[in-house]
Image (tube, rainbow, N blue to C red):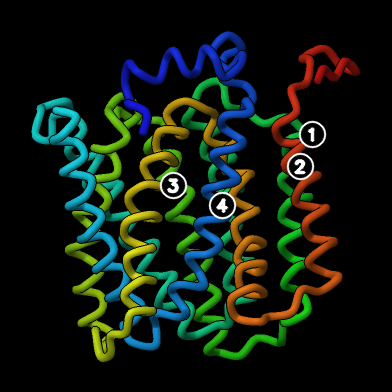
């Protein structure tokens, strides 16, 4: 794991021209990490479904946050990073933690009301929230027309991939859809907050710890408010799914994500998250025998094209694109 403060600088310098070019584009290091993250998050959707057979969804989120918080705190202690230092981030950290908690509360609750195909379309409107927020709150992260076109292209890939299962609204589905749109809003706001406030100047570990600690308190309360049964069955498979979510996803991949947010443009990073549901479909095909359709293959092309457009560096002079 890369240090969030000084140790990252040599690696950034070796990874390409990100710092030299004002963080306008993603280098190969960032893109490689993002592909791994999206694949991990896509697989996480399958592990949540499997673990639902023995642990309630919102309670899963609370357990995951609690375990990951202990791991992050231990990791920071080993690295002698300050946990309680006065750096002016306390209230911003609590705010980010509350947003993080509400996001996952809405995701898990909304999935009970609408189907996964609809949910993922609404959830992955988050990059548009990031792009809009970055324009107003993060200096130097404006998106040009080509980048906006790329976002739209990638999002259209998500719509194509899941469009086969879209049905007419029911009152129940409509409420679930609204919850997922709300989750996307909170996800995007959290990303912009981390990038635009003093949270961007602290270690990724502390940024993540704020969110894990708050959500470890809030999500179990949400589970009780929803009258979930909690843990009602435990098997090696269910335990393994929860360990995967807590150790790999919430601990390791989130640390990498927050490091990326500190080092690269948030709007460019957000475009890559469109890959996550597609990896989820691939994982479902391998592990749950779900079919891979022509629509999914078309979606992969659209998402790839969208990511290329968002991350291609363009000369500021009209008519002068540069690779």
Residue 99, above or below 111: above
Quarter of the N terminus within the rendering: top left
Residue picked out by circle 4 = 38
If you read the primary sequence from the N terminus, does the residue marked by circle 4 or circle 2 appear first?
Answer: 4
Mark 3 surroundings within 10 Å by alpha-carbon count, few (fewer than 14), some (14 through 19), many (20 or more): many
If you read the primary sequence from the N terminus, does the residue marked by circle 4 or circle 3 appear first?
Answer: 4
Residue picked out by circle 2 = 150
Q: Residue placed at 81% from the left, 44% from the top? A: 305
Does residue 240 appear left or right of residue 280 in this picture? left
Mark 4 surroundings within 10 Å by alpha-carbon count, few (fewer than 14), some (14 through 19), many (20 or more): many
Q: Residue placed at 32% from the left, 26% from the top? A: 3
Residue 131, above or below 71: above
Q: Find the residue positioned furthest to the front.
A: 236
Contact (Cβ within 8 Å) of mark 1 with mark 2: yes
Q: Find the residue positioned furthest to the right.
A: 319
Res. 322 image quadrant: top right
In the rendering, at what x and y percent does residue 164 appear? 78, 79
Does residue 53 appear left or right of residue 285 in this picture? left
Quarter of the C terminus within the rendering: top right
If you read the primary sequence from the N terminus, does the residue marked by circle 1 or circle 3 appear first?
Answer: 1
In the rendering, at what x and y percent does residue 102 appear? 34, 63
Residue 177, above or below 72: below
Q: Does residue 118 show up?
A: no
Residue picked out by circle 3 = 189
Q: Find the residue positioned furthest to the top.
A: 20
Mark 2 surroundings within 10 Å by alpha-carbon count, few (fewer than 14), some (14 through 19), many (20 or more): many
**Residue 146: image tag:** 1
Q: Secondary structure at mark 1?
A: helix
CA distance for labels 1 and 3? 23 Å
CA distance for labels 4 and 2? 18 Å
In the rendering, at what x and y percent does residue 269 appear? 57, 38
Query: In front: mark 4 or mark 2?
Result: 4
């Amino acid at each position: 794991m890369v240090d969030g403060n000084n140790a990252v600088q040599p690696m950034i310098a070796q990874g390409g021209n990100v710092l030299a070019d004002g963080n306008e584009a993603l280098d190969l290091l960032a893109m490689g990490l993002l592909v791994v993250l999206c694949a991990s998050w896509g697989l996480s959707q399958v592990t949540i479904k499997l673990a639902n057979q023995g642990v309630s969804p919102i309670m899963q989120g609370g357990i995951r946050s609690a375990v990951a918080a202990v791991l992050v705190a231990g990791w920071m202690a080993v690295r002698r990073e300050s946990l309680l230092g006065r750096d002016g981030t306390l209230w911003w950290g609590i705010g980010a933690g509350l947003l993080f908690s509400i996001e996952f509360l809405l995701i898990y609750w909304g999935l009970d009301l609408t189907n996964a195909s609809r949910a993922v379309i609404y959830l992955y409107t988050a990059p548009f929230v990031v792009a809009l927020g970055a324009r107003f709150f993060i200096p130097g992260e404006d998106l040009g027309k080509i980048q906006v076109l790329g976002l739209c292209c990638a999002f259209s890939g998500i719509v194509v991939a899941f469009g086969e299962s879209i049905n007419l609204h029911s009152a129940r589905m409509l409420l679930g859809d609204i919850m997922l749109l709300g989750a996307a809003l909170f996800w995007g706001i959290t990303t912009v907050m981390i990038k635009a406030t003093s949270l961007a100047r602290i270690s990724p570990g502390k940024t993540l710890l704020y969110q894990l600690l708050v959500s470890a308190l809030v999500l179990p309360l949400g589970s009780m408010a929803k009258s979930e049964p909690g843990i009602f069955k435990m098997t090696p498979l269910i335990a393994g799914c929860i360990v995967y979510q807590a150790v790999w996803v919430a601990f390791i991949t989130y640390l990498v994500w927050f490091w990326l947010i500190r080092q690269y443009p948030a709007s460019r990073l957000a475009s890559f998250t469109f890959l996550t549901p597609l990896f989820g479909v691939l994982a479902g095909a391998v592990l749950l025998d779900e079919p891979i359709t022509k629509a999914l293959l078309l979606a992969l092309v659209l998402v790839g094209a969208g990511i290329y457009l968002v991350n291609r560096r363009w000369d500021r002079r009209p008519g002068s694109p540069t690779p």
